[in-house]
Image (tube, rainbow, N blue to C red):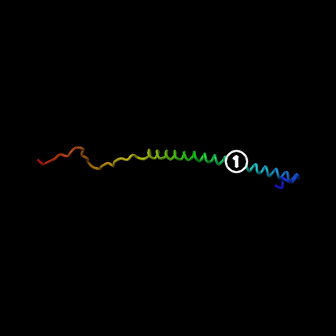
Amino acid sequence: MLSSILNSERAIEVNILIMRAFVRLREAMGSNREFARRLDDLEERIASHDENIRTLFQAIRQLMAAPEKEPKKIGFQLKEKRAVYGSR
């Protein structure tokens, strides 16, 4: 504040440098807000992509899984009814 009251060349230069520093600080804060907004947008898009990728991997795993088959029975299997002997 003293540099804005004094009328010397040096005081004027210091005052100008101080004002430029505040302007740069304000610009930096503004660019950080823009960066934060873009980062939030990117995070939202990635979150939706993650869900889609998870769904895709689940579908691929289902396709890769071998179909469940009944185990084969060992031995001779009759497909006809058994004949009844000796009960007449």
43 left or right of 16 in image: left
Q: Name the residue tied to disc 1.
A: 30
39 left or right of 77 in image: right
Between 75 and 85, the one nearer to me in the picture: 85
Residue at 44 percent across and 46 percent down: it is 62
38 left or right of 23 in image: left
Residue at 82 percent across and 50 percent down: it is 16
**In terms of image quadrants, where is residue 3?**
bottom right
Residue at 84 percent across and 51 percent down: it is 13
> Which quarter of the image is occupied by the N terminus?
bottom right
How dense is the environment of label 1, judged by Cα within 10 Å: few (below 14), some, or many (20 and up)? few
Q: Position of residue 86 (x, y in %)?
A: 12, 48
Residue at 36 percent across and 47 percent down: it is 69
**Residue at far bottom of view:** 2
Between 27 and 87, the one nearer to me in the picture: 27
Q: Position of residue 34 (x, y in %)?
A: 67, 46
Disc 1 residue type (three-letter): Gly
